[in-house]
Amino acid sequence: MYLLMIAMPLSGWIMSSGGKYPISWFGLFEWPKLPVPRGSVLQEFGAQFHETAGWLMLALVLGHVAAALRHHFILKDGVLRRML
């Protein structure tokens, strides 16, 4: 999960750097673009990785939440209480 939390923004940065619009960080400032040509293999890889990793991250987070709820409601071992 930690690897994806680093790889997701990086792949999004690569993907967006090949686009025609500036990269804005929540409207506060513009982020510099990487030298990625529009339509290049690197931009396509970044876009594909970003999409696939996003679905993988969603599955991991849902699995993590399900495991925490299992510990709390089924096993009743106090793990969720200790985490909070």
Image (cartoon, rainbow, N blue to C red):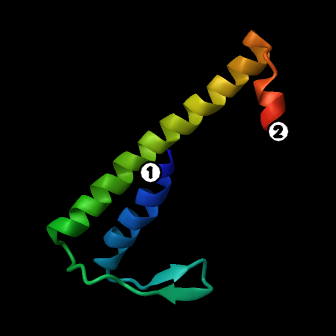
Q: Nearer the viewer, residue 34 or 37?
A: 34
Vertically, is 73 above or below 9?
A: above
Whole-Å distance between the Cαs marked 2 and 1? Answer: 24 Å
Q: Badge 1: how crowded within 10 Å, few (<14), some, or many (20+)?
A: few
Please name the residue shown 50% across and 44% down the image.
1
Vertically, is 31 above or below 84?
A: below
Q: Is residue 26 left or right of residue 4?
A: right
Task: Specify the farthest residue to the top.
Answer: 74
Q: Badge 2: how crowded within 10 Å, few (<14), some, or many (20+)?
A: few
Q: Is residue 54 left or right of residue 70?
A: left
The residue labelled by disc 1 is 3
Question: Residue 56 location in percent, x, y?
Answer: 43, 40
Q: Nearer the viewer, residue 21 or 23?
A: 23
In the rendered image, which quarter is residue 22 located in?
A: bottom left
Please name the residue shown 77% across and 20% down the image.
72
Q: Which mark is residue 84?
A: 2
Vertically, is 81 above or below 58?
A: above
Q: Secondary structure at mark 1?
A: helix
The amino acid beneath tag 2 is Leu
Please name the residue shown 74% across and 11% down the image.
75
Please name the residue shown 69% across and 27% down the image.
68
In the rendered image, which quarter is residue 10 located in?
A: bottom left
Vertically, is 70 above or below 25?
A: above
Point out the tag, 2 or 1, that comes first from the N-terminus. Answer: 1
Question: Residue 48 location in percent, x, y?
Answer: 28, 54
Question: Residue 26 location in percent, x, y?
Answer: 60, 77
Q: Secondary structure at mark 2?
A: loop
The amino acid beneath tag 1 is Leu
Is mark 2 in CB contact (under 8 Å) with mark 1?
A: no
Question: Residue 13 location in percent, x, y?
Answer: 39, 71
